[in-house]
Each structure stands twice: as C-alpha cells, then as structure tokens.
C-alpha cells in the first residue's frame, strides 16, 4: 500500500472521514473554485520558472475550468480570481526572492520512501530552489486569507512542511502563500525543520499506518469550537444519513486515489 501526507492528515483529523474517502471511494465533487484555481495557479508558476508566459498559462488553465459549474466562496467570481492571479504573479516577479535552478526536474518532484511496515510513502514536492539566496524546499499555497506569521519561524509547526522535510532530508523550508484579497499579497514564511521533528514525523506516520491497518475508523466528530471538524466536512451527509447532502457534495469513484491532488492545493 502507498500512503501520502493527505491520507495521514485525513486519518488524524477523523478516522471515519478517512474510511469514506480512501476505503469507500467517496470524493468531494471537483467544483470548488478555490481548489481548481490553486491548481491552475501552480501551473502558471511552473511556466514562470520555465521562462514561459505565466499569465498566459494561468488564463489557459483557468479558462478550462470556466464552464465546470464552479462553486465560488464569498464575493469570488471567475474574472475576479483571474485578475487576482495575474496581480499575484506580477507581485511575485517584482519581489524576485525565489530561484529554481533546473526547473524541469526541481518542480513537482516525486519522492518516495519505504515504511517499516513494508508500505511506501509518496509525496510531490512543489519545488526545490532558493529563497533570498539560501537553498530550501518550497511549498506554494493559494489562499483567500493570510497565514499566521508570528512568532517568527511558526511555519516550522506546519505538518506538511515537516513531512516534506522528512521525505527529502532538507532542513530549510519555506511556504510561499499567494493571498487573494482586495490588495493581493505574497507571504514568504521561512523555517528550519530539526532532525527531531523529522524523526517524530516518521514515528507519527508508522503509528498512523498501524492504526489504519488495524481497521480502526472511529469518528472524531465535533460541531463546537475548537473541535468542530464536522461543520466543514464534505462527508457530513454520510454521517447524518442524508442522501440529498451526499448527492450535492460527493461522488463515488472506484479504485485507489492517494489524494495527491488535494496535497497540491491545501
Ligand atoms: S462529519 Fe464529522 S464524524 Fe463524520 S466524517 Fe466528517 S468529521 Fe468525521
């Protein structure tokens, strides 16, 4: 069996949710505009580092989503998101803080490693390059809200960065967050991941895989802050046994899906 960061994180948030997604084959319908925009924007970034026209790449990728019956959040529209994307690309180019040598091999690089249980773990690393001249592992995010940036180095507590550091052995990491708000902003959050964090993450993965393979899928339900995962869970219709809610947000697909596309965006 092959595991991914998204699988481990879904199990840790709610084992029942993991079972719906990875064993029963239920998936959220791919109509969330924010998710599809994130994928399109990552393609534009890849084009930028290949010295192609990133705005043209964004337009092409985002246009392909236009007639998919997208579900928008808040005041988002297709045009508004495109404009924000172009502004973010311009800001990112002006900042000129990131370099990616050999962009064809250092973007969306697949890493895999064996687990002690005989399984494998696979990740796709957004990019390996430099920030302000320092070699580091890079992760792109698109978001409608700023990420917390204090105290300094807080990104070291992001489990996805810890996971990617564990997969690559690279200590220096950075999240680049493209914030879609009225005045767009690009955040650069740098952190150093320690050996101890990488070892702890390895233990967490082994422990979680053991629980998954023991068939433990008890729900971690909750609807009140700070334990309120059900309020935003796409699988709530299954837990409430409400076919209308299931039809509105889920689709059932056969076969195994590692959720790696989710990982590219969240
Ligand atoms: S609705 Fe709540 S209990 Fe059910 S899968 Fe989602 S998070 Fe878990």
Image (spheres, rainbow, N blue to C red):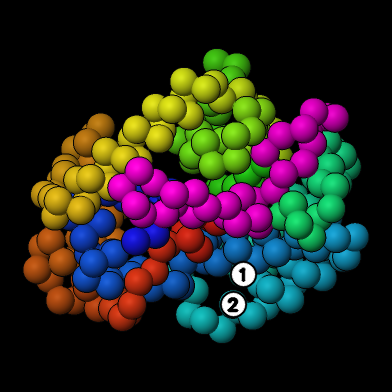
Q: Is mark 1 within 8 Å of ligand 1?
A: no
Distance CA(mark 1)–CA(mark 2): 9 Å
* Residue 26, picture quadrant: bottom left
Q: Earlier in the sequence, mark 1 or mark 2?
A: 2
Q: Residue at x 39, y 27 (%)?
A: 200
* Residue 256, picture quadrant: bottom left
Where disc 2 sits, the SS reads loop
Residue at the limit of the structure toward the top, as seen here: 151
User: As rendered, which of 61 and 90 lies closer to the eye?
Assistant: 61
111 lies above or below 246: above
Q: Is residue 211 left or right of residue 135?
A: left
User: Is residue 127 on the magenta stretch?
Assistant: yes
Residue at the limit of the structure toward the bottom, as seen here: 67
Return the mark for residue 78. Answer: 1
User: As rendered, which of 4 and 15 lies closer to the eye?
Assistant: 4
Where disc 1 sits, the SS reads helix
255 lies above or below 176: below
Which residues, given as a range, are shown in magenta? 108-137
Density class for disc 1 (Cα within 10 Å; few <14, some 14-19, many ≥20) is some
Is the magenta region chiefly helix, strand or loop?
strand
Density class for disc 2 (Cα within 10 Å; few <14, some 14-19, many ≥20) is some
* Residue annotated with mark 2: 65
36 lies above or below 151: below
Q: Is mark 2 within 8 Å of ligand 1?
A: no
User: Is residue 13 on the magenta stretch?
Assistant: no
User: As rendered, which of 75 and 120 lies closer to the eye?
Assistant: 120
């Amino acid at each position: 069996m092959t595991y991914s960061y998204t699988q481990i994180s879904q199990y840790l948030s709610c084992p029942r949710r993991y079972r719906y997604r990875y064993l029963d084959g239920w998936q959220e319908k791919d109509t969330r505009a924010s998710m599809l925009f994130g994928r399109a924007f990552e393609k534009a970034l890849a084009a930028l580092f290949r010295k192609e026209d990133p705005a043209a790449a964004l337009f092409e990728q985002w246009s392909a989503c236009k007639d998919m019956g997208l579900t928008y959040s808040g005041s988002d529209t297709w045009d508004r998101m495109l404009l924000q994307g172009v502004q973010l690309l311009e800001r990112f180019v002006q900042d000129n803080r990131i370099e990616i040598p050999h962009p064809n091999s250092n973007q969306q690089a697949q890493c895999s490693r064996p687990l002690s249980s005989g399984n494998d773990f696979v990740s796709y690393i957004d990019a390996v390059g430099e920030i302000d001249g320092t070699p580091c592992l890079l992760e792109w995010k698109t978001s409608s809200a700023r990420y917390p940036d204090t105290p300094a180095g807080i990104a070291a507590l992001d489990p996805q960065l810890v996971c990617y550091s564990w997969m690559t052995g690279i200590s220096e990491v950075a999240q680049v967050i493209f914030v879609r708000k009225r005045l767009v902003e690009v955040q650069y959050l740098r952190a150093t991941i320690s050996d101890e964090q990488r070892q702890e993450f390895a233990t967490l993965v082994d422990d979680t895989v053991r629980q998954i393979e023991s068939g433990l899928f008890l729900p971690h339900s909750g609807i009140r802050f700070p334990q309120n995962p059900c309020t935003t869970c796409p699988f709530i219709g299954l837990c409430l046994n409400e076919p209308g809610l299931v039809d509105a947000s889920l689709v059932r697909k056969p076969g195994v899906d590692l959720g790696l596309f989710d990982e590219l965006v969240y």
